[in-house]
Image (cartoon, rainbow, N blue to C red):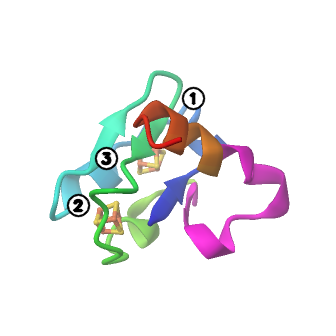
Amino acid sequence: TYVITEPCIGTKDQSCVEVCPVDCIYDGGEHFMINPEECIDCGACEPECPVEAIYPEDEVPEDMQQYVTKAQEFFGLT
Ligand code: SF4
Ligand code: F3S
């Protein structure tokens, strides 16, 4: 899956939402969130984000790891 991290907060640009072929990016309140069960890892969203908030799960920076867990909890996967 891909993961949306902190820079989305206060930005919520939504360019990622527009390009996602499976519509798996949802408004999670403070920031948008990618449903790990629906994401097909196409990578289309990553370059579209103007604040570079999106990473493949295995490339999420150490200080943004909480966003991986946050998405899992938001979609009831833990
Ligand atoms: Fe959607 Fe593809 Fe981004 Fe996954 S990687 S959230 S399927 S655009
Ligand atoms: Fe947020 Fe970037 Fe998408 S700011 S809504 S992750 S395009």
Residue holding disc 2: 20
Q: Which element type, helix, strand or loop, lies under badge 2?
A: loop
Magenta segment: does it hold 13? no
The residue that appears at 74% across and 51% down in the rendered structure is 64
Mark 1 and mark 2 in contact (Cβ < 8 Å)? no
Q: Amino acid at mark 2?
A: Cys
Q: Which residues are magenta?
A: 52-67
Q: Residue at x 32, y 37 (%)?
A: 26
Q: CA distance from mark 3 to mark 1?
A: 17 Å
Whole-number angstrom distance, CA of label 2 to CA of label 3: 7 Å
Which circle's residue, 2 or 3, is located before the other in the chain?
2
Residue 19, position as x, y percentages in the image: 22, 61
The location of residue 6, given as percent across then percent down, is 66, 42
Of the residues tagged 2 and 1, which is closer to the observer? 2
Residue 66 placement, left or right of 27: right
Q: Which mark is residue 25?
A: 3
* 3 or 1: tag closer to the N-terminus: 1
Q: Is mark 3 within 8 Å of ligand 1?
A: yes
| Amino acid type, mark 3 | Ile
Q: Amino acid at mark 1?
A: Gly
Q: How many numbered circles are shown? A: 3
Q: Is residue 70 left or right of residue 65?
A: left
Specify which label sits upstream in the sequence, 2 or 1: 1
* Residue 62 falls in image quadrant: bottom right
Tell me what residue is drawn at x 57 percent, y 60 percent.
52
The quadrant of the image that shows the N terminus is bottom left
Q: Residues within 10 Å of mark 3 (few under 14, many from 20)?
A: many
Residues marked 2 and 3 touching at CB (< 8 Å): yes
Which element type, helix, strand or loop, lies under badge 3? strand
Mark 2 to mark 1 CA distance (whole Å): 21 Å
